[in-house]
Amino acid sequence: MINPSSLIIAGSDSSAGAGIQADLKTFSAHKIYASTVITAITAQNTMGVDSVINIPNKMIEAQLKSISKDLNTSIIKIGMLSNASIIEVVSFCLKKYYPEIPIILDPVMVAKGGHSLLDINSIETLKKELFPKSFLITPNIPETEKILNVKIKNSEDMEFNLKKFDSMNIKNILLKGGHLESNEIIDMLLAGKKIYKFVSSKIKTLNTHGTGCTLASAIACYLFKGFNLYDSINNARKYVIKGIKRGHTIGNGHNPLNHFL
C-alpha cells in the first residue's frame, strides 16, 4: 500500500523565504511528505527579485508525469506560474495525470518587493484553465484587483467584489485582506454562496515574506489531514500568525516567517 502524499507546483525562491521552499517547509512542519514540480527559478533575496528563468514546458510536463507514475498524490498546491504557456501545460497535465485531485491555487502575480511574477496578459488564461479545476483559490487584494479589474479599499469592497467570483465557476475562494490599511486583517471565504470571515490583529512587521505561499500550503496540509475547509483555513491562519511573530531576521528587507514553531 503506497501512502498518500502531496504535490507542490511552484517557482523556486533562492532566499528560501517564499515559493517552493516555503511550501516544502510548511508541509514538513506538518509532517506531510511533498513532491515538487519547479516551474521557474528566481534569483532573489529579502530585498527583491533580481532575475527569473522559466523552466521549459517539456521539463514541467516530464516532472508531473514522472511523479504521477509512482507517487500516490492526494492533494496539489500550485503557486507561481509565470506565463500562459506554463499555465496551459500545467492544466493539460492535471487533466491527464491528476484527474479529481483537489487543488489549492495561490495565484501568485507579484513578489513582496513589487517584481511581477506573472505576465499580465496571462491572467485570462489562468482564469480559464485553472480556476475551474481548483478546489480553492487564495488571492490577495492586489491579485483580486487584477483578476476582476476593480479597486478594493476596504472590507466592504472585499465582500462586494468577492461575490463576483460566483460567475467564474470557482468552487471556493479565500480573499486575503492583509493589504488593507487597517489594524485588523479580515480574510473572507466564499463557499456555497455563503461568506465566512476570519479576523485577526495585524502584526506590524516587515517579516512577512512568503506568507501567501505558506498560508495556501498550510490550508492544503489541514485538508490533507481530513479537516473541513473552514477549520483548515482557521488552523492555517493560526500557523502563519505564529510564524510571523517568530520570524527570521536574515536580511535587510522583507524577512521570512518561521515555519518551524
Image (tube, grey):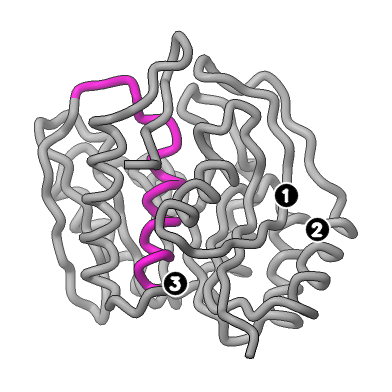
- The residue that appears at 73% across and 37% down in the rendered structure is 41
| Mark 3 lies on residue | 168
Amino acid type at image mark 1: Thr
Foreground of the two, 86 or 214: 214
- Up-down relation of residue 252 to residue 85 (above or below): above
Crowd band around label 3 with a 10 angstrom C-alpha radius: few (<14), some (14–19), many (20+): few
Residue under pointer 1: 39
- On residue 60, the disc is 2
| Label 2 close to label 1 by CB (< 8 Å) | yes
What is the distance, in whole Å, between disc 1 and disc 3 at their CAs? 25 Å
Give the answer, above or below, for where 257 lies relative to 170: above
Percent x, y of residue 130 = 58, 68
The answer to whether residue 205 is magenta is: yes
- The segment highlighted magenta reads 204-223
Instruction: Give the percent coordinates (x, y) of residue 57.
Output: 85, 56
Residue in view at x 52 percent, y 46 percent? 108
Three-letter amino acid code at the position of disc 2: Ile
Q: CA distance from mark 2 to mark 1?
A: 6 Å
